[in-house]
Image (spheres, rainbow, N blue to C red):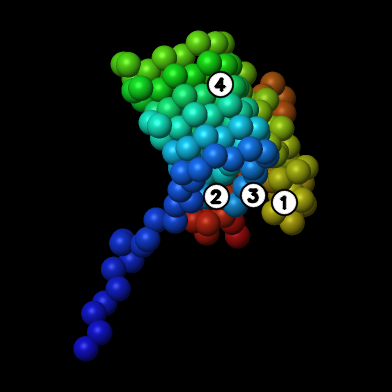
Amino acid sequence: MMGKKDKKHEVEKVLDVDASMQGSLSFKDPVNLRINGRFEGILNTKGNLMIGEHASVNADITGESIIVAGKINGNISALKELKLISPACVVGDITAPLLSIAEGAVFEGNCKMLAHSKSEAHKQGMMMSAEELAKYLEVEVGVISEWVNSGKIPGMKEGDIWRFDRSRIDEWVAEGKIK
């Protein structure tokens, strides 16, 4: 008799790099990337990025959720959060809406937290206008106006203009609230 598969124990998909690499590394789909060796160049990730305690990175990094325990010389742009844990040593500028620096971690550079969330999100295609949202959901702009005015769809008002966070819209659609 075969046992039932436990869906909660799905295997975590991790790309674990313990080597010396140079160049430009970019991921279009979310991954769990852990760097334990040396990396030099440009790194663009989606998903989770972990820079291990023994890692030495000389690169500009863009990612969603980033945890650093090793050494980084370069700028870091995190779309969701950035955590520096001991014995991390970061020399460069940081842009992140949520930042945590643990005791024993070192950071030398400038930090921007507020400017990142709106302007970077719009550049990354995460913030949409009503017209862009209408195209994305394949409905008329009038329907978007109806939904936002009745509070049916999540959005935020900037002055007189409505803006929509793509990830919140995707969650809203996934919950079956679009009719």
90 horizontally vs 26: left or right: left
Query: Which residue matches tag 4?
Result: 73
Residue 146 placement (x, y as % from top left): 67, 45
Q: Residue furthest bottom?
A: 1
Tell me what residue is drawn at x 59 percent, y 22 percent.
Answer: 74
Q: Would residue 21 be visible to someone looking at this image? A: yes
Residue appearing at x 61%, y 32% in the figure = 40
Question: Is there CB contact under 8 Å for labels 3 and 1?
Answer: no
Closer to viewer: mark 3 or mark 4: 4
At label 2, which amino acid type do we have?
A: Pro
User: Along the polypeptide, which appears first: circle 1 or circle 4?
Assistant: 4
Q: Which residue lies under the disc numbered 1?
A: 136
**Horizontally, is 111 left or right of 16 in the view?**
right
Nearer to us of marks 2 and 1 is 2
Mark 4: amino acid = Asn
- Give the amino acid at mark 3: Lys
* Residue position marked by numbered label 2 in the rendering: 30
Q: Between label 2 and label 4, give the one nearer the viewer.
A: 4
Q: Secondary structure at mark 3?
A: loop
Alpha-carbon distance for marks 3 and 2? Answer: 7 Å
Nearer to the camera, 49 or 41: 41
Badge 4 crowding class, 10 Å Cα cut-off, few under 14, some 14 to 19, many 20 or more, is some
C-alpha separation, residue under disc 1 versus residue under disc 4: 38 Å
Q: Nearer the viewer, residue 120 or 22?
A: 22
Quadrant assignment for the C terminus: bottom right
Disc 1 crowd, CA 10 A, few/some/many (<14, 14-19, 20+): few
Q: Horizontal placement of 86 versus 140: left or right? A: left
